[in-house]
Image: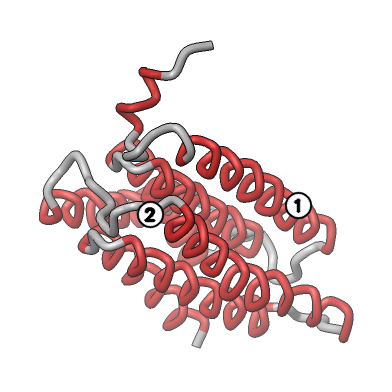
Amino acid sequence: MTNILLIAFLISLVDMGLSKRLNTYTVVLALQGVLLFGVAFIELIEINVVNLLFVLMETIGFKTIAIPYFLNYVIKRNKITRESDPFLPDFLSVVIITTIILGSFLLSNAIKDPHIRKIFFVTALSALFTGLYFIISRKKIITHVMGFLVIENGVFILSLAVGAEMPMLVNIGILLDIFASVLILGVFVNKIGDILKEQDVDQLRNLKD
């Protein structure tokens, strides 16, 4: 069951490469939150009520509900066009993301460590590099925020790749990192929206100290 959820996560990365509409990105991020909860719930060996509630809050409450709602608010608040404006065509993006997944699979096979589960390692690396690709290949600042969230999802999966039981401190660190980053970047995007009509990264060069 865990493998099916992780494969579905990989498919969601390819779907993001095919999509241009920002609302599709938020839907995919919400879906990834549900998938991560399923993986975490299955993989936790010793699960108690407190840990279960924290994982539920982090994945369902934060990743699936709060973050997509906040991103949609920023999009509407700044009247951002519903296109992600990639520098590369969709077909090439799918090819690059597929290459990232295949490269992650080959890299995981080269690592001979019995403590690392390959399917987790492949999915985590794919999310990390795909998120980085979104950041460098999209023009919209808000899309860069979404790329960072994909990277963070990869970090979440990577914490599961090295052991079945997630330490509470790792969860707290990831949650605080997401909260601070999204809050700061959200304020950043809102302030830029008051100055710039189009929130492309190319417009940032017009800003002066």
What residue lies at 67% left-to-right and 76% top-to-bottom?
61
Instruction: Describe the colour scheme in one phrase.
Output: secondary structure
Task: Name the residue tied to disc 1.
Answer: 176
The mark that comes first in sequence, 2 or 1, is: 2
In the image, 79 versus 203, the foreground residue is: 79
* Residue 3: percent from left, percent from top: 46, 79
Residue nearest the observer in this picture, 35 or 205: 205
State the image coordinates of residue 125 (x, y, percent, origin top left).
45, 51
The correct choice, above or below, for 6 with respect to 115 in the image is below
Q: Is residue 110 visible?
A: no
Residue 79 circle label: 2
**What is the x, y in percent for residue 99?**
23, 51
Taking depth in this image into account, of 71 and 208 the one nearest to the observer is 208
The amino acid type, in three-letter code, at marker 1 is: Leu
Question: Distance from label 2 to label 1 (Cα)?
Answer: 28 Å
Q: Secondary structure at mark 2?
A: loop
Q: Residue at x 19, y 51 (%)?
A: 93
Q: Amino acid at mark 2?
A: Lys
Please state if 11 lies on the left or on the right of 128 as rendered.
left
Question: Helix, strand or loop at disc 1?
Answer: helix
Q: Is residue 70 left or right of residue 31?
A: right
Q: Determine the image quadrant of residue 170.
A: bottom right
Residue at 55 percent across and 37 percent down: it is: 191
Q: Residues within 10 Å of mark 2 (few under 14, many from 20)?
A: few
